[in-house]
Image (cartoon, rainbow, N blue to C red):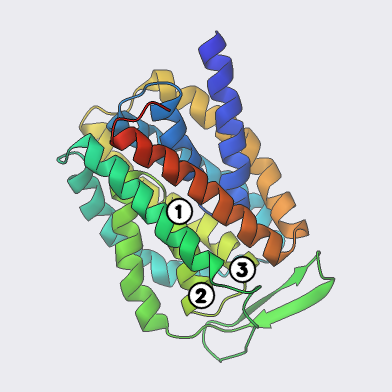
Amino acid sequence: MVVLTALLLVAFVAGVFGSMLGVGGGIVMVPMLTLAFGVPIKTAVATSIVCVIATSSMAQTSFVSRGMTNIRLGMLLEVATSIGAVAGGVTAVLVDGRFLQVAFAFVVFYVAWQMSRRRGDVVPVQTGLLEAGYYDPASGEDVRYGVRRPRLGFVLCLGAGNISGLLGVGGGAFKVPIMNLLMGAPLKATIATSNLMIGVTAATSAAIFYGRGYMDPYWVVPSALGILAGARLGPRLAARMSARALSLTFQVVLAIFGLLMLLKAVGVPV
């Protein structure tokens, strides 16, 4: 009962952060399942994929109603990420678990570094490509924007999808920087759009893990329930926070769990 309660609490926190930052909760669930609960890495990745699907489904009820999700942009990039997710899912069930832990750590370190290079959010520009708009409660302003470099974003999302299937993180840790830093979409729009995409990406690779027997209901069911509860709160917090605060939160979460996973991979007790 203690384990179940702890798992529900961890999943709730993962749901809050995952939906608030557009990363699906896998950034929190994978390291916590392996470090705190002793779950094998591949079972943790499979559990995380289900949690990502749950986060995406719940978060979109809020983000779409607020008009923050750029559905056209999300569907364009999701074609690439779904292809990458299939390749990543196949790879994940064949490689050593320690490699997955090291890969996870370096992925999140890289993304945290990229986010730290930003000085505030991008300046929205109407480019005539996949333009959208939304009302920002934090600033009290209507935001209109278009995107840049859609072809580059499409190619890079192939890699984001591969990371998703390989590590069970939904690919949001890469998709948010790709859409924000390279394609010029405002951070809140990228978080909302990423939340839409991660569920589709995760569902693509979920069948592979299920077929290989890595889906353990003992971990999946309570994790999904906790994630669903947390994902109701995350979008509300994201809508009211400044872009700078969201960016800093994103960096801190990534850096902490990346360090923990790296220590675990090299055999250091944590």
Q: Secondary structure at mark 3?
A: helix
Q: Residue lying at the far front in this picture: please name it.
A: 268
Tag 1 residue: 198
Q: Quadrant of the C terminus?
A: top left
Q: Residue furthest right?
A: 140
Count of all numbered marks drawn on residues in the image: 3
- Element type at mark 2: helix
Residue 17 place in picture, x, y as percent: 60, 45
Do the residues bearing badges 1 and 2 touch, measured as CB atoms within 8 Å? no
Q: In the image, 92: left or right of 183? A: left
The residue at the point 59 percent across, 83 percent down is 131
Q: Which residue is mark 3?
A: 187
Sooner in the amino-acid sequence: mark 1 or mark 3: 3
In which quadrant is the N terminus drawn? top right
Q: Please say if the residues under marks 2 and 3 sit with CB atoms less than 8 Å apart.
A: no
Residue 107 x/y as whole percent = 37, 55
Question: Mark 2 belongs to which amino acid?
Answer: Leu
Callout in the foreground (1, 2)? 2
Q: Disc 1 or 2, which lies upstream in sequence?
A: 2
What residue does disc 2 label? Answer: 181
Q: Is residue 108 visible?
A: yes
